[in-house]
Amino acid sequence: MDKVMDKLDKVLFKNILVFFSDLSSKRISFYIDQSGTVNYIDSYDESDYVEVVEGEEFVVMPLLTDVHTHMRVPGQEEKEDIVSGSKAAARGGFGQIFTMPNTNPVVDNAYLVNYLVNNISKNSLIKIYPVGAVSKSQLGEELSPLLEMKKEGAIAFSDDGKPITTKILRRALIYAKAFDGIIIDHPEDLVLSDNGIIHEGKISRAYGIASIPYTSEEISVARDIALARETRSRLHLAHLSTRYSLKYIEIAKEEGLNVSSEVTVNHLVFNCENIPIFDTRFKVKPPFRDVEDMERLFGALKEGLIDMVCTDHAPHTLEEKELDYSQAPFGTPGLETAFAVLYTNFVMNNKCNLEDVIKWMVVNPSKIFSLPILELKDKSKANFFIFKKNKEFLVESKMFYSKCKLSPFLSKTLFGFPLATFYNGKLVYKDKSFIKSIKCKF
Amino acid sequence: MISHLLSTKFLDLDEVLEIFDNAKKFLEVLSRPTKKIPILKGRLILTLFFEPSTRTRTSFEIAGKTLGADVINLSVSQSSTKKGETIKDTCLTLNAMKPDCIVIRHHISKMPEYITNFTSAKVINAGDGSNEHPSQALLDAFTLMQHFGDLKDKRILILGDVLNSRVARSNIWLLKKFGARVSLCGPSTLVREEFEKEWDVDVYWDVDRAIKDADAIIVLRIQLERAASAWIPNTREYSIFYGLNRERLSKNNNVIIMHPGPMNRGLEISSEIADGKNSLIRNQVTNGVAIRMSIFYHLLAHKDNITLPT
């Protein structure tokens, strides 16, 4: 990789449109020196450079943040590991991501958080923050040692994969208040979900398929907000899927409660009618719901009711996902495609602009979880990704660094895929069509 | 022409009528002393049942054997799923034994459609979860046609656990193709109000009102061992409020009664009604064999231009 950096200072980024986290944008010329530091330049002699990146279509973006992914470490490395997962994140333009604790064993103690932090510092291309389990083994009976885990580097606490039990959620919220800890809940009433595998609606009724009603999420969101009100603690709601959950979020915001929420990229583009029935790539929890839900979720994001977009990147093995629909596990990968999907479906269709995307994937997650902002800055280590507005990609399984290649976007055409990603002064991803003078393999 | 029988949704009426025409010929074969018409001689039919069944499987087996095919029955207790094999592998393995047709019953909706990916055999859905049971619907419609001649504007009431019933779904999709007016009745947990709009049927929760105008009633089995149990309080309450008995039918003496079996006598239907003059329940069973013969013929031998008895 050092050889790469040697050559990199011979690449001129000329008059490139750069977006910043303060939502401003301007054209900047810069190069990255051998130490990985960005240097803005006012005047230059192009002949000093081996290659010049220039053109109206290039855009430099701050690195994205994803507060909801599953790196599957420890114990499920056949699905994903830190190397493959961080490569996938870098390929998608992410600089910092959270990894959920529903692993085997569950990350519910300081020792395992420490193991993860070490594994990450050794193997990750980008920053990965472990989320600790709220309850021992995620069983919802005993509180995990939240403070000890925080000391080792746990960024927040969640029993993601399932909802936190009412008893533990109330205690955890009260307990975490003392150290400003954030509890992330996966809102779902398991009694109502029962063995459901798709959204309860027209399609589940037509085929007589076990289904998950709206109320499974709505009741859980209502409960969570009641507890957030009572405890005045910090609560983050994962992957909202229904329009009915939003009125509770609205109440929470009106009352000034410390409640934030996210929606996955997939839930902004898929609904139970525009996906192939019984294709396990689309089997996710919460399930894709009605068109109206999909549209209202995007509306809520624009209104600021939902704070951020996440991927809920949940890789599984081919063997697991090629089981029949009833047996295949819930979850689908999303890190590589997230930005491109948002860009293609919303920015290009003028439903939102790049500044909105920066709010949802950079500014708000950083504000809510107190994370650094990673963006282009003169005399600082390079932190950004670059994409080309008019560059079209056909999504193919060979594009994926995640061990799970079964993307719901396979064979779709998308724009906005990152061409290169720099994290902390290092080139962590580069498309082979970009800066051809630098040969490197990722 | 269909290549598998997975659902009644995608059957077109002409195809159904052809199956019915041939079924009439096969009925005649079944009334002969020597019940054999070996037009499927040398063909291998596997019945693969992941759920217990006596009547449906026997009906398919008799149908296949009457046509001269070899019929091999595999049931879940002997199958490999207990050894951890996936259904994909089970089907790939069976397919390697070169069956011409697989008749499958599975507790998961849409499983028969899924297995078509792993076999070159014709697949017949003999019941998948709460989704469909197309051969049952075909024999039901055939039985109704025998009785009424034409189903246009005939009012067919499906009574019972529609929510969990594959028989109901297959019947609804099929009967509507004939122009019949389908209504559903049962407790509101089992007959959801959404069905009315989504399926374009009439929904009744009051059984007396539902029965009043019906030309035929298809009574569904209350499967207390299955999902229905969670949606109704108990069998006594069901029987009192939704069970078919003479008193309840006294206002509509001519209504035809059908039941896919096996019946819970005294629960969803009284013995008097099940064995009464308006009951076509026995006819359904005989017709079932003829219809299944016709389905096998349609899927396996249709192109061979074999002349059937007239």
Image: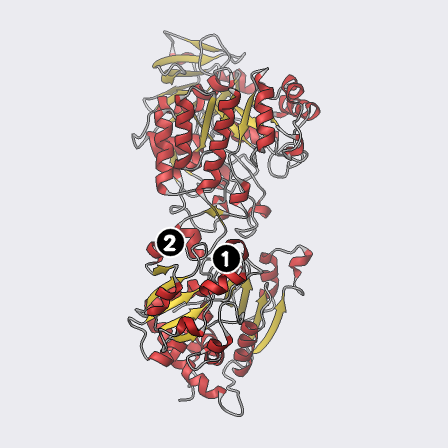
Q: Is residue B271 above or below residue A207?
A: below
- Residue A390 visible in the picture: no
Residue at 42% across, 73% down: B247
Residue at 32% across, 74% down: B151
Q: Residue B164: x, y in percent? A: 48, 59
Subunit bearing disc 1 = B
Q: CA distance from mark 2 to mark 1?
A: 22 Å
> Which kind of residue does numbered mark 2 sit on?
Glu
Q: Residue A242: x, y in percent? A: 41, 37
Q: Residue A181: x, y in percent? A: 57, 19
Residue at 30% across, 69% down: B179
B50 or A345, which is in the foreground?
B50
For marks 2 and 1, the one nearer the N-term is 1
In what element is the residue under mark 2?
A: loop
Tag 2 residue:
B193
Q: Residue furthest bottom?
A: B33
A223 or A338, which is in the foreground?
A223
In what element is the residue under mark 1?
A: loop
For the C terminus of chain A, the quadrant is: top right
> Which kind of residue does numbered mark 1 sit on?
Ser
Q: Residue furthest front?
A: B247
A262 or A221, which is in the foreground?
A221
On residue B72, the disc is none
For the N terminus of chain A, the quadrant is: top right
On residue B109, the disc is 1
Image side of residue A162 versus residue A350, left or right: right
Query: Looking at the rendering, which quadrant does residue A314 occupy?
Result: top right
Q: Is residue A205 above or below residue A401?
A: below
Q: Residue A391: x, y in percent? A: 37, 31
